[in-house]
Image (cartoon, grey):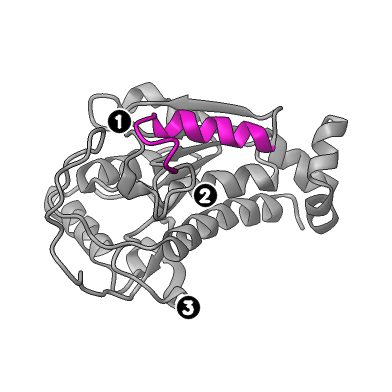
Amino acid sequence: MTDHYCAIFQRTRLLLGDQVMERMATQRVIIFGVGGVGSWCAESLVRSGISRLTIVDADRVCTSNINRQLMATSQTVGQPKVEVLRQRLLTINPDAEIVALEKVFCEETADSFEIASYNYIIDAIDSLKDKALLIRMATQTEAQLFSSMGAALKLDPTRIKVAEFWKVEGDPLARSLRKRFKSEGRFPERKFLCVYSDELLQNKQIDNSAEEPGMFHKAQANGTIVHITAIFGLMLASLVVRDITSETGN
């Protein structure tokens, strides 16, 4: 580790120790989806000492992202999310290796990401089909997978928790994923942890706004707020940090 790295993460080293910090700097992490959840996860990981991070998202910053996505501001609207986020992360740790991939994870592109080469895979994908594919592929590797369930239509941060996927209760996305796995007869190869909340509110009004440039079409836009999406992202990052800590015997 360089002197600059040690200086940046002095307070983290006091908590975790040199052995954990050395491991943190060498682990390879990939995040799929850097929106309201994934962007905060990325920042938390880099601020914790992760130095080899790949961020994946094909979307561009939209005005409607500003209320909850870390890199979304009035000045970054229209710019690729991964590029804006990469530049921000490098201002935190200029020595970090941040790879920004402006592309979609889907059946046609899945193999190009070489996910087996990573130590940790973070799933913050919205698309049900692509999310199911990533989960199945990730659980076929030796990498640790941590997945975000739905962060929309929630307001109470005290109801956010972590559970093994098959034990997640009260989350429509987890329920839809389980239904899809069962209907297709193809299941995750092993267990994995999820961040979720059993809270489910209703939209207060219908979104009649026109689709913004750079935004992928969604069947319905659901209400979201930053303190929920950010906590989801921070909890995902905490799972990575705690797993690295446990692996080093701390």
Quarter in which the N terminus is drawn: top right
Along the polypeptide, which appears first: circle 3 or circle 2?
Answer: 2
Q: Is residue 171 left or right of residue 38?
A: left
Chief secondary structure of the magenta span?
helix
The reply to whether discs 2 and 1 touch (Cβ–Cβ < 8 Å) is no
Q: Give, as a single range, the part of the protein colored magenta.
A: 73-92
Q: Which residue is mark 2?
A: 41
Across and down, in percent, residue 221 comes to: 20, 55
What's the residue at 84%, 29% (across, down)? 2
Quadrant in which residue 104 is drawn = top left
Q: Which residue is mark 3?
A: 158
Which is nearer the eye, 18 or 4?
4
Q: Which residue is mark 1?
A: 104
Along the polypeptide, which appears first: circle 2 or circle 1?
Answer: 2
For the residues marked 3 and 2, what is the alpha-carbon distance in whole angstroms?
A: 18 Å
Asked whether the viewer can see residue 110, the reply is yes
Q: Is residue 156 left or right of residue 97?
A: left
- Amino acid residing under circle 2: Cys
Kindly state the secondary structure of the residue where label 3 is placed: helix
